[in-house]
Image: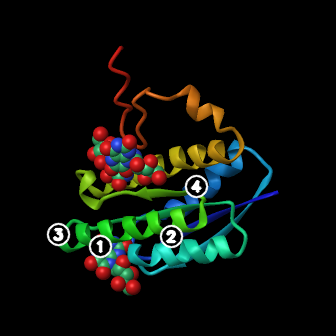
Amino acid sequence: MKLIGIADTTFARYDMAKSIIEELGSTGTGFRISRYTVPGIKDLPVASLLLFNTGCDIVIACGMPGRKPVDKISSQVASTGLMEVQLKVGKHIIEVFVHEDEAKDDRELAWLCDQRAREHAINTYNLLFFPDKLTQNAGKGLRQGYADAGDVMG
Ligand code: RDL
Ligand code: RDL
Ligand code: RDL
């Protein structure tokens, strides 16, 4: 039985963890989920580390960087922290960040959060159980949320 950690924030304007839990549940079995919610993205690195310390095999870190320059700096800091934790423990953290200014309005933002969360839930499941599935998609220009960019060979 594998343990999937989900770290998320109260700052985000959409409950991405809910989408992930739903999507994982309809994708397969063989795992349990441990969820840990923190105030904001800069709290995600240590939340992820604590999840690994409780035995998680992989962590999904969900967050929403806001629109302002200060939020973009926070996002960079948070991502760097998530990298440090991954290198320290030698395990993946799938970063599911949706920048608030990626969407034109709240309705699109909600759709994007749900869609990106679900697509990264499947990536997480495959990384853990069927890594060959990612290799089969290498170079395909896949994106999470908006449409795939596609492969330049057409
Ligand atoms: O440790 C408490 C807070 O400092 C931490 O939760 C920060 O991540 C909160 N935060 C900012 O301070 C900020 O300037 C966040 C953002 N911007 C942001 O854009 N998104 C967040 N948190 O999730
Ligand atoms: O951990 C899951 C994702 O966060 C991770 O795979 C990122 O590398 C995906 N990604 C971005 O989030 C992004 O904003 C990528 C790019 N830009 C990019 O330009 N090229 C990528 N990934 O390969
Ligand atoms: O090509 C358009 C988008 O992929 C590009 O604008 C990305 O930077 C958007 N993006 C993020 O900003 C991010 O923080 C993406 C991710 N995370 C991600 O995990 N997957 C994406 N885009 O496809």
In contact (CB < 8 Å): disc 1 and disc 3: no
**Residue at the left extreme?**
69
x then y, percent, for residue 148: 38, 31
Q: Of marks 2 and 4, which one's residue comes earlier in the chain?
A: 2
**Three-letter amino acid code of the residue under disc 1:** Ser
Say whether residue 89 is left or right of residue 95. right
Q: Of marks 1 and 2, which one's residue comes earlier in the chain?
A: 2
x then y, percent, for residue 119: 52, 44
The residue indicated by pointer 3 is: 69
Say whether residue 18 is left or right of residue 109. right
Q: Nearer the observer, disc 4 or disc 3?
A: 3
Other residues around mark 2 within 10 Å, as few (<14) / some (14–19) / many (≥20): many
**Three-letter amino acid code of the residue under disc 4:** Ile
> Residue at the spot x=60%, y=59% of the render?
91
Coloring basis for residues: rainbow
The residue indicated by pointer 2 is: 8
> Residue at the spot x=45%, y=63% of the render?
83
**Quadrant of residue 26 in the image?**
top right
Q: Secondary structure at mark 2?
A: strand
**Is residue 7 in sight in this rendering?**
yes
The residue indicated by pointer 4 is: 20
Q: Nearer the observer, disc 1 or disc 2?
A: 1
Front residue of this view, candidates 56 and 34: 56
Q: Nearer the observer, disc 1 or disc 4?
A: 1
**Three-letter amino acid code of the residue under disc 2:** Asp
For marks 4 and 3, give the CA distance. 28 Å
> Residue at the spot x=43%, y=33% of the render?
142
